[in-house]
Image (tube, coloured by chain):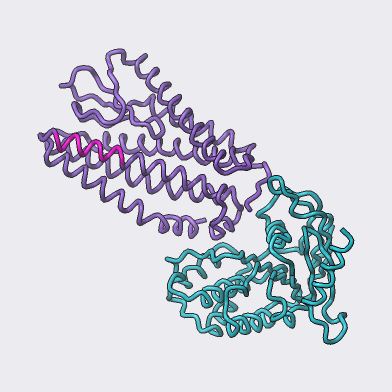
């Protein structure tokens, strides 16, 4: 498994290495020119686009393992197709985690530039909850890749996977939002990156939900435990459904 | 419980989409070092049969009993990642498979003149095919399944690979090779199974065929006889 994982990481080093560099550039620019609104908006938009691509590409590559089934080097891993999709998913999760750490690092650096800064614990917590959310996202993608395998036509399988993934992501996001608003009725929220406030977004799986106190001058911990708990529950649910589903007979033509 | 060393396929039926690809394949091959040619036109079901043997197709009816031990498979497309060196591929196989023999691998690469530090993507088509065959046979298993390993290579490399396969197969194994070019490699096979429309037309020991028989002619006669009856 170790060598297979390493090779899958190498396989995607070009794409995700490039995304990491681009994300770093956006983060550095917004930290250095934090008082330039145009830079903030452009950097934020680019960051969202990069994340959209990174997550969508990861989900698609996981889907392809079982549905295109044209990568025999991966499919021949001990454990067959089921192990193959897990190995690919894990490799892509590691790359997404790298992106998460870079983004959180840039966020922390932006605070330092303002002569204020989150603590090391806050930085680690933010990075950790981001990785948990990305794990939830890929867990759902891996599960749906297996669940839609019985669909004969690959196009319908892809449409079904995208549709189901979108519904699940939005549902998890809505649940997080509802729970946060129950705990903190004064919080406001927006999708994506809130340039009026420099708190890091929650992530409902891959969906960035920026939730913050209405009072812009307060520095609150904007990454809330309840969001991590919802993401962990999503991972648990995906694993629970995967366990019986893995027994279905697969055709990898 | 199958004999250790017997490949037995009984009434194998496979449906892919709306198409019945295999229609009751029966084949029994004892593992005693022989090389079996699987011959048939495009769409006969050769690749489907092979994929059932190696576990890529799990939805089938009928029964497959494999000789005890693993299966080493080479699909009909190059599957090693181009950015990997041959050495890295060898290391991967060594970590994955207990039956992988580094000594056999080394001997193969030396015999074929393959530089292990070269990336797979830098190899010519023929050399890439050689690398794939070498890694397939570096595993010491009772069943080797090679899908069209000779189609994309020049006649010289083809001869080299044929000699290699003949030399390297373990005495207690079965090697199944599918091919279109039966007229050029017929001398490689100890047995021939001819497939048409998802069924085995005939299965012969080559030594039992009359002297001077061209395998391709045998096949053509069988096809003509099949068409005459349908």
Tell me which residue sits at (69%, 49%) in the image: B16
Region in magenta: A38-49
Q: Is residue A217 above or below residue B112?
A: above
Q: Main secondary structure of the magenta part?
A: helix
User: Which chain has been coloured cyan in this picture?
Assistant: B
Q: Is residue B229 above or below residue B168?
A: above
Image quarter where the N terminus of chain B lies is bottom right
Is A213 left, or right, of B45 in this rendering? Answer: left
User: Which chain has been coloured purple in this picture?
Assistant: A
Is A18 left, or right, of B189 in this rendering? Answer: left
Give coordinates of residue B102: x percent, y percent: 56, 75
Residue B104 occupies which quadrant of the picture? bottom right
Residue A56 occupies which quadrant of the picture? top left
Q: Is residue A47 above or below residue B58?
A: above
Seen from the viewer's position, the closer of residues A52 and B19 is: B19
Identify the residue at the far right of this view. Answer: B229
Residue B176 occupies which quadrant of the picture? bottom right
């Amino acid at each position: 498994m170790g060598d297979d994982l390493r090779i899958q990481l190498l396989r995607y080093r070009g794409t995700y290495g490039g995304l990491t560099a681009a994300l770093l550039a956006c983060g550095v620019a917004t930290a250095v020119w934090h008082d330039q609104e145009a830079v903030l908006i452009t950097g934020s938009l680019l960051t969202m686009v990069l994340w959209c691509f990174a997550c969508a590409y990861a989900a698609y590559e996981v889907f392809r393992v079982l549905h295109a089934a044209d990568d025999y080097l991966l499919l021949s891993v001990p454990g067959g197709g089921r192990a193959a999709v897990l190995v690919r998913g894990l490799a892509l999760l590691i790359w997404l985690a790298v992106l998460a750490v870079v983004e959180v690092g840039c966020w922390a650096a932006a605070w330092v530039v303002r002569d204020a800064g989150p603590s090391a614990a806050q930085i680690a917590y933010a990075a950790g909850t981001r990785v948990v959310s990305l794990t939830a996202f890929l867990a759902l993608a891996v599960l749906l890749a297996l669940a839609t395998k019985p669909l004969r036509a690959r196009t319908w399988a892809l449409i079904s996977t995208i549709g189901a993934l979108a519904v699940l992501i939005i549902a998890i996001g809505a649940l997080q939002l509802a729970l946060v608003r129950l705990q903190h009725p004064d919080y406001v929220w927006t999708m994506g990156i809130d340039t009026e406030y420099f708190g890091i977004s929650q992530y409902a799986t891959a969906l960035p939900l920026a939730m913050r106190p209405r009072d812009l001058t307060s520095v609150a911990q904007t990454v809330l435990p309840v969001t991590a708990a919802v993401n962990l529950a999503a991972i648990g649910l995906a694993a629970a459904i995967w366990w019986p589903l893995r027994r279905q007979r697969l055709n990898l033509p | 419980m199958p004999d250790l060393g017997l490949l037995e396929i009984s009434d194998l039926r496979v449906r892919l989409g709306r198409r019945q690809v295999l229609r009751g394949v029966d084949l029994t091959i004892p593992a005693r070092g022989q090389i079996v040619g699987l011959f048939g036109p495009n769409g006969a079901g050769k690749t489907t049969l092979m994929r059932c043997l190696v576990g890529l197709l799990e939805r089938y009816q009928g029964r497959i009993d494999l000789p005890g031990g693993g299966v080493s498979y080479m699909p009909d497309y190059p599957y090693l990642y181009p950015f990997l060196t041959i050495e890295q591929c060898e290391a991967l196989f060594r970590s994955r498979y207990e039956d992988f023999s580094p000594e056999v691998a080394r001997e193969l690469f030396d015999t074929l003149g393959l530089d292990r530090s070269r990336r797979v993507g830098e190899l010519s088509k023929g050399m890439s095919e050689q690398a794939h065959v070498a890694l397939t046979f570096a595993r010491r298993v009772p069943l080797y399944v090679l899908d069209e390993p000779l189609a994309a290579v020049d006649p010289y490399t083809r001869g080299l690979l044929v000699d290699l396969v003949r030399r390297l197969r373990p005495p207690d194994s079965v090697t199944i090779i599918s091919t279109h070019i039966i007229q050029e490699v017929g001398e490689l096979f100890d047995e021939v199974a001819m497939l048409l429309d998802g069924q085995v037309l005939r299965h012969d020991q080559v030594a039992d065929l009359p002297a001077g028989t061209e395998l391709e002619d045998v096949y053509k006669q069988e096809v003509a006889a099949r068409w005459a009856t349908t």
